[in-house]
Image: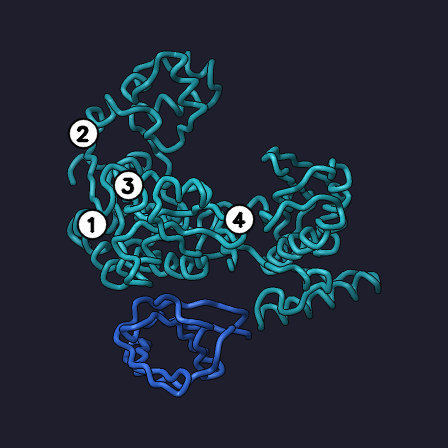
Chain colours: A blue, B cyan
Amino acid sequence: MVVHGEQVRVAAVFEPGKRIRPVWFERHRRQHKVLETTYSWRDQVGDTTLLHFTVSDGEALFELVYNPHEGNWILKDEPLAL
Amino acid sequence: MKNWSRVIMHIDMNAFFASVEQQTDPELRGKPIAVIGTGRTVVTTASYEARAFGVKTGMNTWQARQACPQLIFVVGDNRKYADTSTRIVAMMRDYTPLVEVFSIDEAFLDITGSLSLFGSAERIAYLLKARIRHELGLTCSIGIAPNKLLAKLASEMHKPDGLTIIAPDQVASVLEHLPVKELCGIGRNVEKRLADFGIFTCGQLGRYPVEVLKRRFGINGERLSQMGRGSDDSPVIPPEEEQAVKSVGHSMTLAHDVTGREGLLKYLLQLAEMVGSRARRYGVTGKTVHLTLRYGDFTTVGRQQTRTSPTNQSEAIYQDALAILDTFDLSQPVRLLGVRITNLTHHGDQLPLFEQERKVALATAAMDEANSRFGAFAVTYASVLETEEKGSHVISPAWRPDGIRRVDVK
């Protein structure tokens, strides 16, 4: 399963009711605090469900993708907007 | 709700794709935006702010920019919209099992049997609106009426975020001066033909002698007369009661117009594989293969060919489509290609008797298994690998959240 972007460290809270809330992520050795998750959605690629989170650190918008099958987080290519 | 034989609700998501994008990016909220596809630059949805400037679905980016110079273009993400639609339909099913998905952003609900559980139709509408807004940040317009025709009409009356009820005793007054084109199912052609009879409003249509309408419009004449009177007894059909599909097809608007046979082959093979793999996944085979071509000047032509035996093998579909392709004039640039199988048989797979065919079927099954695990086109024909954009990039009006009509979009 290929998602274009870089694998990143993410801190997330797995809340009751299968809700996942990203708290911070690292990019270029800088920690970005997630101030708002503006949208989330899921995507099925083959038998893998990918969870997409559009998050804002107050400066830019980013898309984080969680792959529960592989247990990793991908930060999609570039900030979505500035 | 006295005097209501049925209570039907129509839900229409407001500027769906654009609203999802405005929700995703707070910077876009309150601004004129247009969602466009990749490659060809046509507006698929405009936000209400953009519509105020005259930006409409189907405009190219140049026309849209002319209408609204400060317009922001956003490349759409069909997978996000498909998931959002699926989640909204799931919310609807919490209020009634009778949900008929009409398109990715519209659905009918028969809530007749749910009123005693939830109190009233208005309450169900407000609960749904609140849930959709709370969980997704989106708004919808809801129409409530005694049938689907009027419920859809009602939802169109107040946008965005409206709730309109047409009670049985209001039907005649609502329709009396309403232009016929406002009814779902009356397009420009029918509107024009009705105008030739001096029929401009629903009131006039409902009173017009049905025998004359039948002579002019055939079997649709009676239906038109009923529509003019606001009568519609069509049921809300949930997916499990839907009729079996009659065709499996895919079409593709090419990134650029392509001239000549050679340039079209990889797209044709890709379409044959998309049709074949979906048909195999749902255990259907087709005996007739159709090919549709749209030239650069938007002239659309189509031909079909019936096989001796039904198939869902991509290679066989490709060969038939290719034979049809060779009957067309390919000296003109082609804009769109479509492949479809019809004359369907619904049954499980059967392993062919002969060695060569058996090898093909086993190889196809292995390919399908890999693709079902790793995603469409993870394993595919070598010549398709070169194609820049594989898979379906457009959400068809026939898209549904479940079953064979759920096409995985890119």
Q: Name the spot of residue B128 as percent of width and height, x first.
A: 24, 55
The residue depicted at 57 percent of the width and 44 percent of the height is B246
The residue labelled by disc 4 is: B40
| Labels 2 and 4 share a subunit | yes
What secondary structure is marked by label 1?
A: helix
The residue labelled by disc 3 is: B52
Are the residues tagged 2 and 4 within 8 Å (C-beta)?
no
Vertical placement of residue B68 versus B273, above or below: above
Q: Residues within 10 Å of mark 3 (few under 14, many from 20)?
A: few
The residue labelled by disc 1 is: B115
Quarter of the figure that contains the N terminus of chain B: top left
| Side of A17 relative to B214 (left or right) | left
The first of marks 2 and 3 along the sequence is: 3
| Labels 1 and 2 share a subunit | yes
* Dot in front, 1 or 3: 3
| Labels 4 and 1 share a subunit | yes
The residue labelled by disc 2 is: B170
